[in-house]
């Protein structure tokens, strides 16, 4: 088992290197660089910079060097936890994004848990009561969840919560609580603001998971080993739980792994609409202003989160399915 | 029929129907069988004739929503000797049937590759069966499981018991299945095509194993197969099925030496016999088993029967079971119209 | 007592005679059976599809959407940029169908004012003033499908305004903009999927067919692309588009960008199918007959995967539409004057405005409905093409 994990970790290293290179190239794609965009901003507010000032700025930010050199200067800081310097915010990148990455992770993680907890029981119910009213209702709701985009759901919730329920729906805390010191009330307030984005993010994945769980379970319930279990004299609910559901969970773990990128993406959009401080808004701004280390680090770290998520999913799968362990 | 003989299992006019979107499938359409204690009954027929469904009906393992035992009795004599219950009438999910499954009637299946759950060890699955029906300590159950693995000839039982099924070969898995089925010493073992998915050499081993275990455990065996070679090896009595009905039944010797029903004759003729000169061509029965949804009025075999096709059959209607010689029955008009001793099966 | 032994022997002879008789008929029967099967495979799939009512509904909705998009300019009462500032931020109007017992659709005339407290525009319908809705009415000129100049609209009013989904801050009719916007939203999906398919089919089939280092290389590339969370990646790529590019070039660039990620899913799906088919006998037979790889791929594999290609193309559409909407919503996608549903939703980004005038969210529902319809359709196609499920 440990060998399996080690093998996978080592395999991730070349992937990581290539990804960091691609990331760097991508954030360099927009024409110009930070200096030109700073120039543009100054120009739009009526000022101007002469050529030598521009050059000086370039040198100061190390933008006069060639791309590979800039890349190396960036990457070499990683082992030290130095992800570069934000040109716009005038601070180390890590300080700016650490907290926000935390929120991204939290929202994504909670959304995954939500999906897991909701879709498995519903999937089991739907499979065992195929074509019943409940099954059809869940199927339809599932399709709805699949189809309404997350930004749309966020907007709808915002309007509904504010207009119909009169509660504060954006941000992490209500206006009274924002500056208040930590307390149980504040914590509850936070939870109240966290569950809508988590549910919205989870809904899309839930629909898919329910369909897959239902489909898998239907297949598995027809499998020979389920009949064998029954023929031994086991109670039906034990047969379903111990033999059918247990097997159905395996492919679900892979599917869950595939949801991770969607969750990370979704956290950006939902965070933007509902004003949860994920990395979304900062990322957007960094892209536009060509704040390349900031943009690059955010993209890179999100990708790393994805890779680690996939690794965890693979490990979970190997743990749960002995057939994979032995490969 | 020898009414005085105590039977272990008696099926009377069983009818099991499936209700599908496209129509009703009359998988078992009036089957009567008697299993005598300690004997092996071979149930023979092509795929789709309803033999597996008969077996599943005994243990009530058929899907509840789409199938139903429409008519008939399945009388089973329980181990205490006095009680006879009708399995067809009891609750398919109730305690009674669950106390019989695995404990008094056990079943092994065709596909050893998929009969065991891949996520639990072999030992886990066998011990589960043991602990379900016996009040003993887990350690004792484990010992017993190891003993069972030994008696099926698995080899290296101490380590095999903790192996996962996917590490075993097909033959090994089938042995595990047998060990699991026999772990509570059932009085009846139903074997549904246990060797069909195995290599020929392994087939022979498994059949030998079943024969010796039957003697050792004093079991009754219902062997379901389309393989006549297997039947010849192991069966004391034979029942031939076609499209949900028994068309011929008798002792193994009688049916092999003196097949009566055209279908039986056709089956026996289509088996290649090693050693025979190849002058005569292999003559399979022309045509194939008809669509299970179609309802054929009268004799269901006449569409493929050479006697009917060559206008030698006296009629189209279905026949009643007739006892042509002692304990040898056939359902065919060719034997019915003349004076024959009529049996008490319909 | 019949002599059953004799009867038994007799039946054996009957079998032999029957075989001789059957042999002559056997050939003819076999060839006619084969023909019956070949022609009915597509018919079988069609019949299976038709039975799935939800999928059929999805298909009809998709068809409707595209037809509407084709004739959009004609169907709507106003053009894309037509401003009626007297009626800005108008809520959706109710259409009444019976005017004093007769069937004649109409809307009420409106009197505008401003709420003194919230400064919100208010429109009071005037029941006295009933403005009839006319059909095939002359309105602002437009170019049908961008080519044919015309000015007849399917419906409209001679005075006042008929706004089924309300108006925005500049008095532009949302209904007209949503329907015309569907042209862009739906075609980006088509083009994007087509492009993804070309790349994905080529790479996926090669990957599955050739195996070895080709497969390894392509799989690695796919892995790396899929390691990036899609939305941030798209965000980064679209941010790279120079702001001075004309809208049409931006349109195509966005399509290419979306396809650059989209092809990976299609390639994976096709690779799986090809891996399974590669071992089939008919491929082996073709190879033994001396067919080249190219021949096998184009003449055997691709036709065999054809139904699968249709299914995955249909299922890939929702993702494309969704991606474009999300990106445009964020301001990173298409730019005005190009209007898609996502662009229309940009206005909804302003929370204050949205709370006052929630109908600005309507384009989002169209996105949802189109995705729903494509999903139903794709699901139904997949079930129909799969011979093993009931």
Image: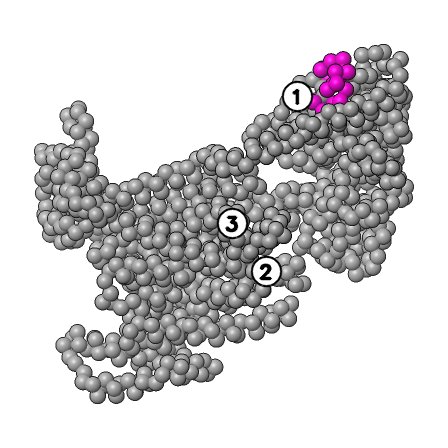
Would residue C14 be counted in the magenta stretch? no
According to the picture, the residue beneath numbered tag 3 turns out to be C299
Residue B308, horizontal then vertical, whole percent: 74, 18
Disc 1 to disc 3, how far (Cα)? 44 Å
> Is residue A77 or residue A249 the one in the foreground?
A77
Residue A248, horizontal then vertical, whole percent: 59, 50
According to the picture, the residue beneath numbered tag 1 turns out to be B296
What residue range appears in magenta? B303-320
User: How is the rendered protein coloured?
Assistant: one colour
When asked about the image quadrant of residue A64, the answer is bottom left
- How many numbered tags mark residues here? 3
For the residues labelled 1 and 3, say whether their Cβ atoms are less than 8 Å apart. no
Q: Residue at x 62, y 25 (%)?
A: B294
Which image quarter holds the N terminus of chain A?
A: bottom right
According to the picture, the residue beneath numbered tag 2 turns out to be A317
Q: Is residue B24 above or below residue A310?
A: above
């Amino acid at each position: 088992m440990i060998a399996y994990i080690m093998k996978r970790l080592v395999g991730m290293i070349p992937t990581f290197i290539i990804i960091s290179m691609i990331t760097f190239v991508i954030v360099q794609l927009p024409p110009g660089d930070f200096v030109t965009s700073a120039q543009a901003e100054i120009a739009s507010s009526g000022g101007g910079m002469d050529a030598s000032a521009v050059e000086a700025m370039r040198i100061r930010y190390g933008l006069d060097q060639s791309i590979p050199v800039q890349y190396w200067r960036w990457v070499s800081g990683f082992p030290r936890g130095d992800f570069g310097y934000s040109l716009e915010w005038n601070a180390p990148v890590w300080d700016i994004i650490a907290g926000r990455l935390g929120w991204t992770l939290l929202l994504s993680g909670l959304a995954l848990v939500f999906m897991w907890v909701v879709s498995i029981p519903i999937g089991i119910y739907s499979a065992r009561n195929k074509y019943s009213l409940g099954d059809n209702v869940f199927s339809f709701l599932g399709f709805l969840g699949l189809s309404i985009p997350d930004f749309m759901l966020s907007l709808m919730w915002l309007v509904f919560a504010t207009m119909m329920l009169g509660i504060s729906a954006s941000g992490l805390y209500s206006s009274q609580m924002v500056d208040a010191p930590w307390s149980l009330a504040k914590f509850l307030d936070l939870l109240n603001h966290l569950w809508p984005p988590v549910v919205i993010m989870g809904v899309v994945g839930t629909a898919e998971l329910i369909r897959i769980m239902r489909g898998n379970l239907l297949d598995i319930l027809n499998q020979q080993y389920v009949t064998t279990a029954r023929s031994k004299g086991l109670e039906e609910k034990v047969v379903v739980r111990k033999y059918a559901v247990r097997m159905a969970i395996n492919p679900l773990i892979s599917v869950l792994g595939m949801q991770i990128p969607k969750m990370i993406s979704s956290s950006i959009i939902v965070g933007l609409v509902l004003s949860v401080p994920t990395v979304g808004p900062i990322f957007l701004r960094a892209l536009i202003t060509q704040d390349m280390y900031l943009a690059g680090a955010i993209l890179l770290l999100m990708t790393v989160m994805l890779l680690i998520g996939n690794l965890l999913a693979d490990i979970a799968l190997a743990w749960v399915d002995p057939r994979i362990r032995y490969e | 029929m020898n009414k005085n003989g105590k039977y272990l299992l008696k099926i009377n006019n069983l009818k099991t129907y499936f209700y599908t979107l496209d129509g009703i499938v009359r998988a078992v359409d009036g089957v009567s069988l008697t299993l005598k204690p300690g004997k092996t009954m071979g149930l023979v027929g092509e795929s789709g004739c309803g033999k597996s469904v008969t077996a599943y009906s005994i243990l009530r393992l058929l899907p509840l929503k789409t199938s139903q035992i429409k008519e008939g009795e399945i009388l089973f004599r329980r181990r205490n000797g006095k009680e006879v219950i009708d399995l067809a009438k009891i609750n398919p999910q109730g305690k009674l049937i669950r106390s019989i499954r695995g404990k008094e009637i056990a079943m092994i299946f065709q596909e050893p590759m998929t009969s065991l759950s891949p996520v639990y060890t072999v030992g886990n699955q066998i011990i589960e069966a043991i602990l379900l029906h016996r009040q003993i300590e887990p350690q004792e159950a484990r010992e017993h499981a190891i003993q069972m693995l030994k008696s099926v000839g698995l080899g290296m039982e101490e380590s095999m018991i903790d192996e996962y099924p996917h590490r075993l070969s097909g033959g090994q898995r089938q042995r595990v299945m047998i060990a699991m089925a026999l772990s509570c010493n059932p009085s009846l073992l139903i074997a549904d095509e246990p060797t069909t998915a195995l290599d020929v050499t392994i087939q022979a081993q498994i059949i030998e194993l079943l024969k010796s275990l039957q003697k050792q455990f004093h079991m009754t065996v219902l062997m379901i197969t389309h393989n006549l070679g297997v039947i010849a090896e192991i069966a004391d009595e034979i029942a031939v099925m076609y499209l949900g009905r028994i068309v011929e039944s008798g002792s193994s010797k009688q049916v092999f030496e003196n097949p009566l029903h055209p279908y039986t004759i056709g089956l026996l003729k289509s088996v290649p016999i090693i050693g025979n000169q190849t002058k005569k061509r292999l003559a399979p029965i022309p045509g194939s088993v008809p669509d299970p949804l179609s309802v054929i009025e009268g004799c269901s075999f006449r569409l493929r029967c050479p006697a009917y096709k060559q206008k030698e059959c006296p009629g189209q209607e279905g026949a009643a079971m007739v006892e042509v010689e002692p304990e040898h029955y056939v359902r065919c008009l060719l034997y019915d119209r003349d004076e024959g001793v009529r049996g008490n099966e319909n | 007592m019949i002599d059953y032994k004799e009867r038994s022997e007799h039946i054996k002879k009957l079998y032999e005679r029957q075989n001789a008789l059957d042999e002559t008929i056997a050939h003819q029967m076999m060839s006619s059976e084969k023909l019956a099967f070949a022609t009915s495979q597509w018919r079988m799939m069609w019949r299976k599809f038709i039975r799935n009512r939800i999928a059929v509904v999805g298909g009809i909705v998709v068809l409707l959407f595209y037809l509407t998009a084709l004739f959009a300019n004609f169907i709507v009462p106003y053009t894309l940029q037509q401003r009626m500032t007297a009626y800005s931020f108008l809520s959706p109007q109710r259409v009444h169908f019976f005017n004093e017992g007769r069937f004649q659709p109409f809307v009420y005339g409106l009197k505008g004012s401003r709420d003194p407290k919230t400064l919100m525009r208010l429109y009071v319908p005037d029941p006295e003033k009933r403005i009839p809705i006319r059909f095939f009415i002359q309105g602002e000129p437009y170019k049908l499908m961008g080519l044919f100049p015309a000015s007849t609209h399917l419906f409209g009013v001679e005075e006042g305004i008929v706004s089924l989904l309300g108006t925005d801050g500049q008095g532009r009719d949302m209904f007209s903009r949503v329907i015309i916007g569907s042209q862009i939203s739906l075609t980006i999906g088509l083009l994007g999927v087509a492009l993804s398919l070309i790349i994905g089919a080529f790479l996926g089939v090669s990957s599955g067919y050739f195996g070895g280092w080709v497969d390894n290389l392509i799989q690695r590339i796919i892995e790396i692309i899929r390691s990036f969370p899609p939305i941030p990646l798209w965000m980064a790529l679209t941010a790279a588009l120079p702001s001075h590019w004309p809208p049409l070039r931006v349109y195509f660039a966005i399509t290419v960008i979306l396809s650059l990620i989209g092809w990976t899913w299609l390639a994976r799906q096709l690779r799986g199918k090809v891996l399974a088919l590669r071992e089939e006998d008919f491929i082996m037979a073709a190879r033994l007959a001396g067919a080249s790889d190219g021949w096998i791929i184009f003449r055997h594999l691709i036709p065999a995967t054809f139904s699968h290609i249709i299914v995955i193309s249909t299922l890939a559409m929702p993702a494309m539409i969704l991606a474009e909407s999300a990106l445009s919503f964020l301001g990173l996608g298409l730019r005005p004057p190009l209007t898609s549903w996502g662009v229309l939703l940009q206005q909804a980004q302003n929370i204050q405005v949205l709370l006052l005038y929630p109908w600005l969210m309507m384009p989002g529902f169209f996105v949802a409905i189109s995705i729903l319809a494509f999903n139903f359709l794709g699901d139904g196609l997949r079930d129909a093409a799969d011979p093993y499920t009931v």
